[in-house]
Image (cartoon, helix red, strand yellow):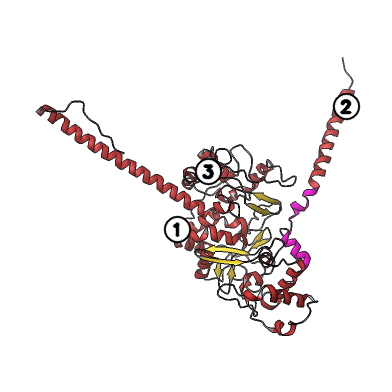
Amino acid sequence: MGFMLTPPVKPNTSFGRAFFAPVSASLLCFSALVATAGAAFAEDASDLVARGRYLATAADCAARHTAPHGGEPFAGGYGIDTPLGKIFSTNITPSRTDGIGSYSEEDFARAVREGVAKDGSHLYPAMPYTAYAKITDDDMKALYAYFMPEVKPVKHKPQQTELPFPFSIRASMAMWNLPFLDKDRFGPNPAKSAEWNRGDYLSEALEHCSTCHTPRNLFMAEAGGQSLAGGPVGSWYAPNITSNAVSGIGGWSDGELTRYLKTGHVAGKAQAAGPMAEAVEDSLQYLPDEDIKAIVTYLKDVPAISSGDIHPRSDFGKPSTEAEASLRGLPGQSENQNGFHVFSGSCAACHQLEGQGNDHYPSLFHNTAAGGDRPDNLVSTILYGLHRTVGDHVAFMPAFGPDASYADRLSDRDIADVSNYVLTHYGNPSVKLTEADVARIRDGGEKPLIVRLAPFAAPVAIVFALAVVALLSWLVSRRRERPVLG
């Protein structure tokens, strides 16, 4: 903005004209400089906010902090299934009562990077602060500049997270962070190209790929030396995405990886479902091509780790009509007969009788969900369906599990039988499922040892406390029994 100064007396002498003319010119120049500086400042602030908006998209913040089925953006309430229980995301709008409106930039950075809220309470690493710790200072400033003035404040208290003891003790995360939280900021590798380093930063910090795609150790931290080698994510399984040509993505072309990250679909290879579909829909599709290219460059150079596979997951299967000819009309008493009847009644209309799919639904052969060495993603897709929107294209499959609303609900036995049918005829025939396997996957997958031991934590804690009390009582009584010397 400029300033206009009106002199109290109009100069009408030669002296006045000689004096006021240069002063007026100086004031006009000053006003122009102030206006230019103001415009530059506004442009800089606008650029900072725009960068923060992009970083929030790359970090997938909206997806994890927006409740499904019409929740307000960033107002929390998204339930994240973990082996410890369901963790609900918090409100990160600038609401001063329910969100982060009272956070300073330092408070904000500490919560994002260290998992510690302004009130000192600890967040669970379902909020991937172990990855966000790498975010640079400049990018953290941009994120704060975006969230505070640009995000709509929403007065909403999302459902509280209630984990079983001892995981309910949030203060225990302070001890967990000591060995498992690396607070080092991202630093470029001088031996690598600028594109590789950009891909490293996007993959490991913002997109936090390792949070899902790395196996966990006994204490539910990412296993050292196994980065991106694959790991369970609730009922889903995030596969190996190292450069291994068989177990990972080393056999994928750059074009295939680019298409998958941007659309979640590569014909004859893979389709994104579950958490990966959400990452594509809410984050990856909006990244510019050069950033996707950088991620591909980085992932193709990640050290190769074998998961023990003999063939790539996308190489299994072929069109098959053998079962249709031999099983049609039979009563469906056996597992194979029941699997065929479920497939014929619930799957074939979309995926076609030979499993070849069509323009809207993928083939079941040459499909990583059916060709993997574990059935988690196949079963989870049947249980929970699929919904992925990229641009104007919507990929949809109804859920057939207990909460199905658009299709017939299938029992655990039906899901096991139809999965075995698909695996035998279109996928990896060495994988077999039982009803118990389906129930396990529906319940969030195999529970790690620390979760299986959790029910014993309370009795052990009580016994330990009683032992401490007994020891203290004994020490006090011994002290009282000592003779007084005098």
Q: Is residue 10 visible?
A: yes
Q: Amino acid at mark 3?
A: Pro
Q: Amino acid at mark 2?
A: Ser
What residue lies at 73% left-to-right and 82% top-to-bottom? Answer: 328
Q: Quadrant of residue 474?
A: top right
**Who is closer to the viewer here, 310 or 3?**
3
Question: What residue does disc 3 label?
Answer: 153
Question: What residue does disc 1 label?
Answer: 194
Q: Where residue 285 appears, x then y in whole percent? A: 50, 61
Find the magenta span and give its range: 432-455
Question: What residue does disc 2 label?
Answer: 477
**Who is closer to the viewer here, 381 or 317?**
381
Q: Earlier in the sequence, mark 1 or mark 2?
A: 1
Q: Where residue 434 appears, x then y in whole percent? A: 77, 68
Viewed as shown, does residue 434 lie left or right of 238? right
Q: Earlier in the sequence, mark 3 or mark 1?
A: 3
